[in-house]
Every structure is written in structure tokens, then in C-alpha cells.
Image: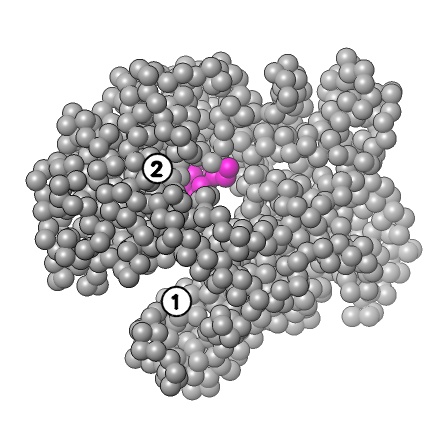
Amino acid sequence: MTVSRRVFVKAGGLALFSLGLDPLFLARAAYAANRPTVQPSNRPTLVCLFQRGAVDGLNMIVPHGEPAYYQERPRIAIPASDVVDVDGHFGLHPSLAPLKELWVNKSLAAIHAVGSPDATRSHFDAQDYMETGTPGVKRTADGWVNRYCQHDREHADTPFRAVGFGPQLPRILAGSAPSLAIDDLQAFGLRAPQDATRDRLTRAFEELYDGAGTGLLATSSREGFEAVQLLKRANPTQYVPASGAEYPPGRLGKTLLQIAQLIKADVGLEIAFADCSGWDTHVNQGSSEGQLSARLRELGLALAAFNKDLGERMSNIVVLTMSEFGRTIRENGNSGTDHGHATAMLALGGPVNGGRVLGRWPGLGVEQRFEGRDVAVTTDFRDLFGEILARHLGAIDLGAVFPGYVPDPARFLGAIRA
Amino acid sequence: MLSIVAAIGVLTAQAPGLAPGPSLTPRDSAFHALNRLAYGARPGEADSVAHVGVMRWIEQQLDANHIPDARLAARERNFKILDYDRADLAGRYRDAVRERQRMQREVGDSFPLSNRRGGQGVRSAPMREFRELGGELQQLALVRAALSERQLREVMVDFWTNHFNVFVGKGADRFLVPSYIEETIRPRALGRFEDLLIATARSPAMLFYLDNAQSVAPGSSRRFGRNEMPQERRRRQPTGINENYARELLELHTLGVDGGYTQQDVIEVTRIFTGWSIERPERGAGFVFHDWAHDRGTKHVFGMTFHDDGKDEGIRLLKFLAMQQATMHHVSAKLCARFVADEPPDGCIDAAVAAWQKSRGDIRAVLRAIFTSPDFWAPQAVRAKVKTPFEFVVSAVRAAGVEPDDTPRLAQMVARLGEPLYQQPAPTGYAETEAHWVNSGALLARMNAAMVIAKECSSIPTIDDHAQLVDQIDQLLMAGTMSAHTKTVILEQLTDTGDPQQAKTLAVGLALGGPDFQKQ
């Protein structure tokens, strides 16, 4: 089946080439032709949460066994008595207590001392590098998630394969493979005051674009209307989270609820991406309570609700948090922390080799630090992202996803169960 | 140059069909020119341009300063941001940041912290005001594009702003970008490339965005004033060269990625630009050359030698780059991708390069060569390009006779379609090609935008007869180019719509959101 489709695409492609149509259109046409009609409900899914602003990894996953941690942070360190200990050396911030259960059942892992090989302390540059997947190279036009979609077409393709939750398509999803930005699932598609008007308008535009013949306008509009239809069947307005899961109020909870809806709608979601902001804690960061604590509480409650809501389906889902860099080991004069280097990330889900802190811990001693002040990076973020792409989603060609990087499974941390 | 103008004037007067291809009617030629040199046609404009003669109209557009633009000038007066200079904005930004920090210190955890993208910042009044100015900046671009009679100049402002892209969200660029647009780009959009290149190189916005402001010769150190505190001395003292600007200068602004330069060239160019920096915000954040940071050693690049000539080294290099074959080809190809086709034919590029060479980089001469090239008027170039989100919104507003207001409403619409103005983080700027802009989510968003604009349409009268209504829309919004299929579908949709006002809104929305109007 797949083979014959490919031959068709190839032959069709040659025919179109002779008409002088551009190859990018052919690429999109090929995506469309590869799409099977039935979506398997057990396809693996990756959910990425970007903690924009640089989360303080040291107060998120606390190295309470390190005396230096307490020496450098007299006002903002988490007292050992408050830390949710996980292995005698590390522990979760008390606000992440709702996740303790997931740690114990080994579906939650932390990765410490992870980050970029590039030394920049600019949010702008570091976020860019983490999204393009090319640290140090500013000109990369597309994001690594999009490049994964470009190169791994073995997977079924649907308009909902890669979705960014927010008003605009994030850099990580930008590129030639189709991807969607959805600000509000319920408002996706054409907007009209009544359902009947909306359906009519949708049909009208569908007919208009049916006449657009071939080309990207025709292909893309067809994908769009197909997405509207798929979603209509899924009926997002009637959604009730399973098992009494309660998402916390606020944008993050709402977004994770929508991602859960989309996963359960079986529309072929493979990678979801969402922002989660407010981590740039230069002033009054707080300790067990305070600003960072409030943000972590929302994160912990949202992840726990997501896990509960998806239940059995978590066996095929990985949620990964990421942040552009970490923060200084020493607290600053405003009871906050400044821009640092390595940070910590969380991986949650059935496929995760959980219940442990992964990655080599460099220590906080002065000589162990990066530039004498920050947590050193011992895991290149591409080694972590690459492992998840390869072992969870089945990516074949990591070299194409991360140009300039030589993938080596020997460097994988074992974040995904074998 | 006068003789060229005269010659074209004579040509159009005597044989209006000569420059436009023989297959285009004068009205179609005018509509094509309005789609490319302008942000689309206002109702009836294709006819008026055809009446003047399309080549004469193009000459008028090239001579933008002689086109009266009083209506826009009146509207511009509503924009507060034009009253503030760089120093004012720097001060306001500083106040806003201080106020936010003060509130954070006082209120602690009840406020979420702000960050770069989409964060809910602390809502202090100075920060809210500063953000509103950012919205004004975007909306001003939209109002100018929609209302200016100097359409080609507005198109070129957009082209150069994108070619010399600066991201407004990076640190100091939040307050440096407005003067970059007003003082660096706009006055030179139809001038000489060399002047534009030098102006961008000296602009605080670019110096900050591509990090040249902190590129210093290794081992150099600043002499500090007597009243500067030691703490301030340590703060952000740069320690070496930063290649970022030099690399993008060669790769994006001038020679192009295949321009035949090496990593060593990038380093030499970086050394030449050491010391090109920005004054502190308190002093106005203007351009400054720091002698102490400049690499006084000998640099060899592109067969030239530079030695201890301070700021003039960079000027000499920029003048050289502006006239290189690779630069002329790279920038001409980009102009042709904008005006002719996503993959422009060689003919128009070669014509543009020849004009560049002959005119020593006069942008108007280069544009004239493109607009008189057969490739520009070839049938396969007509309606061959998909509008960018900005072009789509502005052309819909112009066609529908919507008066853009001073709120950032329409600018937000452009952002939702994927092209938030001044907010492209990568130095490449936004892409020009169809593949970049057309995807399923973006198309649905365009249809919704079209329905919103249709509700305010003032250019189409309310007509009971549906066939007449659709014909009016075809004539006034699309200069008679609506496809038979589009007409049929719209008519079908109107069959059970009794209310003529509703019928008009639906028909205009379908026309603006349909496939024909996405093209130019």
C-alpha cells in the first residue's frame, strides 16, 4: 500500500515537474498523498512545554544534598525539610508535590544539568537555538520539530500532526512541513455567531477553493477543511476531563486540557507544543513560597491533571518541559537569580524511564561551575530531544533534524524505556 | 535619467501596449502594476491608472516625493509615537522597567513575571503605555500602506525593513526600532543602496540586534570617566569580537550565501567594525565610534588592505560591498522575487543588475529596469504570487474602502495570519514565497479576516439583484478578474439570502477570502 502510493507520488511528481511547478508544492502534495484514511489511536505523541524566561532548575529539582546550594542561596534555597525528597540528594520543589506519585510509579523523570553548548545568556538567542535546534547558528529558518516532520514521513500525516497552541506558529514548528497554530480549539475553523451559519460558510469557502485547481492554495485549504471536519466530529465543546481530573485555572491548564482533547479526538496529533511563561525570576524569586513556587504549583497541578485525564493513554505519551537556560547558582541582591547556563527538564509519561534524575550531575563547587558561576551543561539538549524523537516517535534520521550535530545513541541518557 | 523618463513618457503616450505584454489589456496591466507596486487597487483605481497610462503612473510612483500625500500626513498626526525620539523612548522604557521591578519587589508572588513571548506582564501603567506605543508602531505601518498615495515607497519601506530585518523584541530594540524605521529606512527607501547600507550599519537598532555594539578588539579596554562607579565598570564589559553582524552583512545584506566569502573574511570584516557601537541610553542611545575598542591591526579582505583608519575602514568596506557583482545579483534577485515571481526568471534579474551597475546603485533605476522588463509583464507573472499576510490585509482594506483606525486591531489581524510586524526574530526577515505563507491554519484565518473586513465594506453599494451585486464586486474589488467559478459559487450562496445587506457582506467576504483574492 505504502509502496504503491509512493510510486504514484513519484510519478505524479515528475509529471508536475514538467509543468514547471515548484518542488515545495510537490513536497506538500506528497504529504497529502501519504495520508491514510484511518488514524490509529495508539500512535505515540510528544507534548513539549517551553518554560520561557529560563526556569531556575536548582529550585525546581533541588540538590538538597549539596552544601554549596545552601551556602549560595541564604534567602531563596528550599529548606531540606520542605523538599519532596526523591533520592536523598535531589528532591522536588514542594509545589511539585502533586507529581510525587508519578515519580514513585516511575513515569516521571528529571534531567539535570541539561542545556545548550552555546554560552549565550540572552533569552532571545537561547530560545531561538533551542527551537531551531542549531545552537550558535542564528540563520536557521525552520524549527527542529518541523524538520522532524519533513524528514519522517513514514508516519501518518494529518493536518493535526504538529500543533502549536497559541496565537502564532512558534519557531520550533516553522518550516515547510504543514503545521497548525491553534489558539482556541473551540474556535478553530470559521467563526460565525450560529452553528448553522458557520457550517454554511465553511461549505461555501470549501467550494470556492475546490475550484482553485492544483497548487498549494488548493492542497492547504483541503487540509484545513478536513481538519475542521475531523474536529467537528470530535466535538470539543462537549469535553469533560476523565476520572474527575481538574486542571488548574490559567492559560497552562487550559492549554493542556485542549491538548488532551485533541489527543483523545484521534485526529493524528503527533507533536503538540505550548508556551508556559513567567520564569524570569530576577527579583523576589521566593523559596518554598513565592513567585517561582506559584508558577511551579500551576505546572505541577496541570501535569498531574493531564496525566489523570489521559489515564491509560499516557502509555504512548511523553510530556517534555524545556527552558532556554538555567539561573545563577548564587542568589542576587534582589533575592532573585540572574541568567545562568544549565537547567533541569522534566519528562512524564508511560514510555519514560522514570523515578530518577538523569544526566551526569556536575556538582556546584566553584571549580565545577561553568564560567565560575553557573551549573555546567553535561547533557546537550539535542541528546535528550534526539533520544525522545528516535526512541519514542521512531525518528530515523536525527542528523537531518539537527544539522551540524552527530547523533550517537551512546550519549542518550536512557530517558525512554528500551 | 531625464531622457529615460521622457522616452518612457513618449512610449506610453504613443504605444500604450509596448511595455506591458501584448496579451494584457490596459486595465489588466494597470491592475497587475497596482498589485505589485502598490498594495492592490482601490475601487476604480485600475481604470484611472489605465487612463493615465500604466508606465506614466509607474514613473510617478518612482518619483514619490512629488506625489502629494496630505491625507496620510493628517492621519500620521494621530500617532503619538512619531512625537518621540530615540532618547524619549529609551527613557520611557527605562521608567517602565523600573516601575515593574519596583512593583515586583513590593507585591511579590501575586504577580506573574513577564517574559519574551506572550507573557502576562506585570501591569504597571508605564509598561502598559510603552506596550501601547509598540502597537502604534505596527498600526502606523498598516495605515501608511493602506492610505499613502506614495504606494511604491511604502512597498519599498516594507521590502528594506525586511531585508535589513531587526527584531523589536530583543532588549534595547524595543525602543530603538521606531527611529530605525523613521530615520534609517524610510528616507532612503528609494535612494541609493550604498546610503541605505551605511545607514543600517550605523543604526543603533542594527548594532544592538546583531551584537556589533559589543564587538571589541581583543585586549582592548575602555577608559572610564572619573565619576563612573567601579561596579559600573565591571558591568557588561565586552571582551572580544562578535562576528554576528559581519556574517549577516555578507550573507544577507550584501553578497548572499553563495557570494564567495570565507570564514576568514568574516573575521576580517568583524575586526573592521570593532568600535561601532551605541551610546548609553541616558545619552540618547545614538551611534558612537569607540576608538578604544577598534582593532588597529592590519586587515586583509577581498583584495583590500585596511590599517588603522578608524571608522572610515567600515565606510570604505560598505561602499565596496554595495557595488560588488554578488551583491547586485543577490539583492536584485530578491527584488525580482518580490515584484515578478517567487522564482524570478534570469531576464529581469540581469536587467536589474545592469541598471544597478550603470546607475551606481540608484534604487529607482534598478526598479525601473524590473518594471520595464518583459518578465514583469509576462502572462505567467500575472497573479502568480500569493499575497503575504500584510499584503492581504492591506489590499482587502483598500479594496473594501475600510478606513483603518488608530487602534492596533488590523495589525493584530496581520499578526494572527502569521506576520507580526517587526517581530521576526531571525535576521533573514520574513520569507517572500508562497510555500511559507500558505498552510491550512493560515488560510482559515484569512477567511475569517475576510469576513471581518467585509462587515465594514463601504465600497460596494447594497444591491437587490444578486447577479448585479457579484458583478459590482468583481469590477470594484478585483478589476474584472474574478474567475467564473468564484462568481458561480458566490451566486449559489446568495440564493436564499433575502436581506440585501447580508447578501452584500457574505458576497464581499467570500470574494476577499476566496482563492482569487489571495493572489496578486
In the rendered image, the quadrant that contains the C terminus of chain B is top right
**Residue flagged by tag 1: what amino acid is it?**
Glu
* Crowd tier of the residue under label 1, counting other residues whose Cα lies within 10 Å: few below 14, some 14–19, many 20 or above: many
Mark 1 highlights which residue? B243
User: Residue A295 location, x and y as percent?
Assistant: 33, 40
Q: Which secondary structure dominates the residues rendered in magenta?
A: loop
Q: Nearer the viewer, residue A404 or B81?
A: B81
Q: Which residues are magenta?
A: A167-177
Is B260 displayed left or right of A349 in the figure? right
Q: Marks 2 and 1: in contact by CB < 8 Å?
A: no
Q: Chain of mark 2?
A: A
Q: Residues within 10 Å of mark 2 (few under 14, many from 20)?
A: many
Residue visible at 48% across and 63% down in the picture: B94
Left or right of B364 in this view: A366: left
On the image, the x and y values in percent for residue B43 come to: 82, 40
Q: Is A238 in front, or is B128? A: B128
Residue A252, image quadrant: top left
User: Is B356 inside the magenta-drawn segment?
Assistant: no
Q: Which mark is residue B162?
A: none
For label 2, the SS is: strand
The chain under label 1 reads B
Quarter placement of the N terminus of chain B: bottom right
Q: What SS does tag 1 mark?
A: loop
Q: Is residue B257 left or right of residue B402?
A: left
Residue A297 placement (x, y as % from top left): 30, 36
User: What's under tag 2, amino acid-wise?
Assistant: Leu
Q: Which mark is residue A49?
A: 2
Do badges 1 and 2 share one subunit?
Answer: no
